[in-house]
Amino acid sequence: MVTEPAGVSRLDQLGRALRDLRISVTDRCNFRCRYCMPKEVFGQAYHFLPREQILSFEEITRLARVFATLGTRKLRLTGGEPLIRRDLEQLVASLAEIPGIEDMALTTNGSLLTPAKAAALKAAGLGRVTVSLDSLDDHTFQAMNDVGFPVAKVLSAISAAQLAGLTPVKVNMVVKRGVNQDSILPMAAHFRGTGVTLRFIEYMDVGNSNGWQLVDVVSAREILDAVGANWPLEPVAPTRPGEVARRYRYLDGKGEIGLIASVTQPFCGGCTRARLSAEGQLYTCLFASQGHDLRRLLRDGSTDQELSAFIEGVWGRRTDRYSELRTADTTALAKIEMSHIGG
Ligand code: SAM
Ligand code: SF4
Ligand code: SF4
C-alpha cells in the first residue's frame, strides 16, 4: 500500500478530523439478522437499489482518492454484505493504490469468505477482516441470522482469513439480552489464545426496523465483568485517537477482547468517521437521517476540486454526536438503516 502523505486533515465543528471512511458497496445481504434487516421489513416486497443507482468501482475509487486528499487514512468496506458484490478484489486493488491510505479492512458475515476469496483479497491489498458472529450455538446463531446459516461455516471463514494473512482478524458479536447473552463466555473461551480479537458490541438503535429497546442492551460493563470473572483482564491503552473499542488483555497472555459501548459509554468526541452508502450518499453519523448526494456530483461532471470542496463543506459543518445525546425522543427519529451504511 502507498503511504506518502496526501493532504491535510480538515476539522469539523467539534475539532474532529476526517480520518476514516466506511464504504458500503451494496445494500443487499444474504442474512436477515433480526437486529439489522428483519425479514418482516426486508422481505420479498422490499425495494433494494437497482444496479444503475449503485456506485461503480471507478466512482468509489475516485471518491476515496478525494477523501484521502482531505486526510482520510483508513478505509473499511462494508454493506449489506460486501462479498455479495462480484469481484470485490478489483475494488480493493484500486483502493490500495491511493496515496495516503494506510489501512484497509473489510467487515463481512463470512458466508462467502472462502480460502480462495480470502487469498484474492489479500493479494489485491486488503489488510484485515472483521467477521461477524453472534454465537457458537447453532440454534441461537441461526435464530439471529434468520436464514439458518450454520456457525461452522463462519468459523471456516475466520480460519480462511487467518490463513490468508488478513490479520489480526477481529470477530464482532452483537449482544442482545435474552437472545445470545449465554454465548458471551463460550465465545470468549473459544477465541482466547487464537490470535483473534473478539469484540462485544452493545446492541444499537440504528435504523427504524429492529424494534430496539434499551432493556435489550447488555452493557459493556456487564460483559466485561462476566468475562473478567472467568479470566482476569487489564485495560490496554488505545493505540490511536478515535479508537471505538475499549481494549482489554487477558492477564494470562491469551490475547485481547474489545468492547464497543456505543450506548452506555458513547465515544462521539473522537468520532472521525464518514460513511458512504452504496448509492453514493455521504453520512456524517451512523444515526443520520439525511445524507449528502455525492453520486449526483460524480455523474454531473464535477471536477475533483468541486467534489473535494463539497465534502470539505459537509465535514466542516458537522456537529453530530447522536450517541451522547441519545434520549427516548431521539431513538424515535427517522434514521438510515444499518444495512445502507454498514455500521
Ligand atoms: N454484513 C456484514 C457483517 O454483518 O459483518 C457487514 C455489515 S453489518 C451492518 C456491520 C456490523 O454491524 C456487523 O458486525 C453487525 O453485527 C453490526 N450491527 C448490525 N446491526 C446492529 C445493531 N443494531 N447494533 C449493533 N451492531 C449492529
Ligand atoms: Fe446482513 Fe450484516 Fe446486517 Fe446481518 S448485520 S443482516 S449479515 S448486513
Ligand atoms: Fe460518531 Fe454519530 Fe456514533 Fe457519535 S453517534 S460515535 S458521531 S457515528
Image (tube, rainbow, N blue to C red):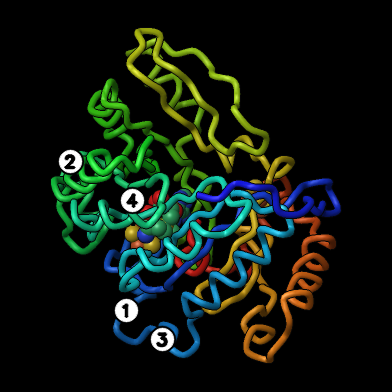
Disc 4 versus disc 2: distance between alpha carbons?
A: 30 Å
Disc 3 versus disc 4: distance between alpha carbons?
A: 33 Å
Q: Is residue 271 above or below residue 50?
A: above
Q: Is residue 75 above or below residue 246?
A: below
Disc 4 versus disc 1: distance between alpha carbons?
A: 34 Å
> Element under label 3?
loop
Query: Mark 4 highlights which residue?
Result: 122
Query: Mark 2 highlights which residue?
Result: 137
**Foreground mark, 4 or 2?**
4
Point out residue 198 in the picture as x, y percentages from the top left corner: 37, 33
Point out residue 319 in the picture as x, y percentages from the top left corner: 80, 56
Q: Is residue 165 above or below residue 56?
A: above
Residue type, mark 2 in image? Asp
Residue type, mark 1 in image? Gly
Q: Is residue 176 above or below residue 148?
A: above
Q: Earlier in the sequence, mark 3 or mark 4?
A: 3
Local packing at callout 4 (Cα closer than 10 Å; few below 14, some 14-19, many 20+) is: many
Q: What label does residue 47 carry, if any?
A: 3
* Residue 176 seen: no
Ligand 2 shows up in which quadrant of the image? bottom left
**Foreground mark, 3 or 1?**
3
Count of numbered marks: 4
Residue type, mark 4 in image? Lys
**Which is nearer the eye, 19 or 180?**
19
Q: Earlier in the sequence, mark 2 or mark 1?
A: 1
> Element under label 2?
loop
> Element under label 1?
loop
Q: What label does residue 43 carry, if any?
A: 1
